[in-house]
Image: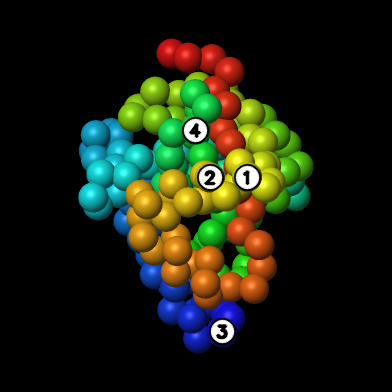
Amino acid sequence: MGSKSYDLVWGSVLRTTTVLHRGIYALSRGKLGRRFPGGAQVVWITTLGCRSGDWRRTPLLAVPDSGGWGIAGSNAGQEKIPGWVFNARAHGQGQVEVDGEVSEAVFTEVQGEDAVRIYTALGEAWSSYRMYQRNIAREIPVFRVTMLTRP
């Protein structure tokens, strides 16, 4: 389960990919970067920093769930929980952007069957999620994103 070398490599890959994704998305004015390779949906969540008090915007792979979206704090299978999870737990409201449309949203951490269903769907959308789960000892937090306003 989990290793420092895995976290170092995948942490670097994840950070680099996220920086590139942000840049491509910004340069294309949101026209590129709406989908992962293979067609999986990317959503941008905006959460209030639990320590900084600053708004943080994060691109994540998502799957449709109960009229909203399912996301997970896998952090590419690293032992460290991603910062947005702490923000969503501390301040359950923020925004979600899907295909260029921004909505106010509520982030609800789910457990049990709901978490398994969402995480399984994420694994079907992007097979690396199955590897992430095998590589770490921690439980991967799973959230439902419910849109409060629709554009």
Q: CA distance from mark 3 to mark 4?
A: 32 Å
Mark 2 lies on residue: 117
- Where's residue 36, x and y in %? 30, 49
Q: Residue at x 56, y 33 (%)?
A: 145
Mark 2 touches mark 1? (CB < 8 Å) = yes
Residue 65: assigned label: 4
Q: CA distance from mark 2 to mark 1?
A: 6 Å
Q: CA distance from mark 4 to mark 1?
A: 13 Å
- Where's residue 53, x and y in %? 71, 41
Residue 3: assigned label: 3
Mark 1 lies on residue: 113
- Mark 4 is on which residue type? Asp
| Element carrying mark 1 | helix
Labels 3 and 2: the sequence-earlier one? 3
Q: CA distance from mark 2 to mark 4?
A: 9 Å
Mark 3 or mark 4: which is in front? 4
Q: Residue 57 versus residue 119: which sits nearer the camera?
A: 119
- Mark 2 is on which residue type? Arg
Mark 2 touches mark 4? (CB < 8 Å) = yes
| Element carrying mark 3 | loop
| Element carrying mark 4 | strand
- Mark 3 is on which residue type? Ser
Q: Residue at x 35, y 27 (%)?
A: 100
Mark 1 touches mark 3? (CB < 8 Å) = no
